Amino acid sequence: MRPAGTTGQIRVPRHDTADRPFIVIWEATRACPLACRHCRAEARPDRDPGELSTAEAFDLIEQVAAFGSPPPLFVITGGDPFQRPDLFALVRHGHRIGLPVAVSPSGTPTLTEAGLTGLRDAGARAVSLSLDGSDARVHDDFRATPGVFDWTLDAWRAARDLGLKVQINTTVTGHNLTDLPEIVRVVHEMGALTWSAFLLVPTGRGKLLPGLDPHQVEDVLNFVYDAGAHVPARTTEAHHFRRIAVQREILRGHGADHVAALGLGPLYEGLRDRLAALDLPVRRARRPPMDVSSARGFVFVSHRGTVHPSGFLPTPAGDVRRERLTDIYRTSPLFVGLRDPANLTGKCGACEFRTICGGSRSRALAASGDPYAEEPWCSYRPGSFPYQDELAAHVPAGGRAVPPA
C-alpha cells in the first residue's frame, strides 16, 4: 500500500488500490444517436436487449458500495446514458446508498437543462462532457453530427448554473493537434473542474483513425503540463504524463531547459507559443496527476456486465451477473497481474518510472496483443533522464532503472 496524499508531483489514493478502486465506470448502454469517429463502444441507435436490467443495475450499484469506505467514484457512461429511461432512478439509488455518482452523457438533443436538473436532483455530483475542437467546424466533424458543439456548450453552461461539477474530455488525434491551445482557452473561459486530454486507443471505431507517433505524444503531454498552469489539466490513457510531471518539476528546480533536456520538437514549441500568446491567468496551484491505472484503482463494467481493467482493454476478467465485483477486482488473475509492475516487458519493464507510469495497458494490447508489452506511444529511453538520483522523492521503491531485456 502506498502512503496517502501526494508523493512529490503525483497524487495517490488514500487507500490500497489492490483492495478498492478509486473509480468504477459503468457503460450503462451502447445506444447513442451520434456516430463519433473514435467511439470505443461502436455505439448504435438502439439499446441492446442484453443490457443490465434495472434490477441488475441496482445490484451492480450495491456491489460497488460493498467495496467499503471511502466508496469509489461511480461514473455512469455509454453510449448515451440518457437513452436509459431508468437513469434518474439509478443515480438516485447510488446516491441513497452513499456513492459519489457522476454521469458522462453524449452531446445530443437529449442533453437538456431539464435532464441535467433531473441528474442533480437525483444526487449526481458531476457530469463529464466531450470537447474535441474549439469551434463547431472541428468538433462537429469529429463527432460526425452537426450541432453537437452548440449542444455541448449549452449543456456546459446549464450544468455549471445548476451547481454540477463539469469535467471536459478532449480526444487528441491529428484532427485537433494544433487546436489544443484554443480548446484550453474555451475551457478557461467556460470554467471546468478538470480538463482531460485523452490519447486515442485504437479500439472500436478508433482503429480507423491515424494515431500519433511517440514524439508527437511527448510534445502533446508536455503541452498539457504547461496548460496545467492555467486550467486543471489531466490525461486519460496517457500514464506517461505522470513521468513528465516529475521530470518537469526536477528540471525546473535546476533551472534546466526542458525542451533540450527532454528532446521536445516543433509541435511542442508551436503549441507552447500559441498558449503563451493567449495570455491566460496563472492558477495559484497546479493539480498533480492521480496515480490510477487499469486494474490499479480503475475498473470498467460493460453494458452486459462483463468486467474489464479499462473500457479500452476488451479482455474480460469476470461478469457481475455471476460473480461479485469486489472479488473480480481483488482476485482475478488479469487484475492482479496488471497491478504488478514486475510483469511489464520491453521498455516499460526496464523503465525507472514504471511504478508511477507503466504505460497504457490498453494501447499495448491493441498494438501487440499483449497487455504487458511496452507502451507503443512512448519515446522515453529508460535511464536517460539526467537527474536519476533525485527520483527517489517521486518514484516508489522498485522504480529504479534496469537494463532493457
Image (tube, rainbow, N blue to C red):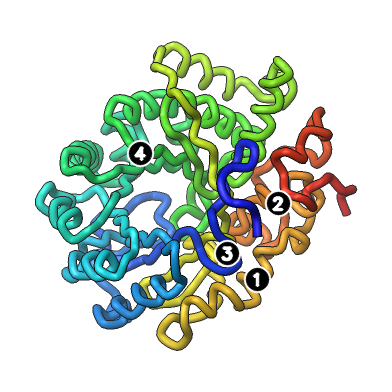
Q: Earlier in the sequence, mark 1 or mark 3?
A: 3
Cβ–Cβ below 8 Å for labels 3 and 2?
Answer: no
**Residue marked by disc 4:** 193
Q: Is residue 77 visible?
A: no
316 and 96: which is toward the camera: 96
**Residue marked by disc 2:** 355
Question: Which residue sits at x=62%, y=34%?
Answer: 245
Element class at badge 2? loop
Near mark 4 (Cα within 10 A), the count class, few <14, some 14-19 or many ≥20, is: some
**Residue marked by disc 1:** 336
Cβ–Cβ below 8 Å for labels 2 and 1?
Answer: no
Near mark 2 (Cα within 10 A), the count class, few <14, some 14-19 or many ≥20, is: many
Element class at badge 1? helix
On the image, which quarter does residue 167 sit in?
top left
Could you tell me the amino acid type at mark 3?
Answer: Ala
**Residue marked by disc 3:** 295
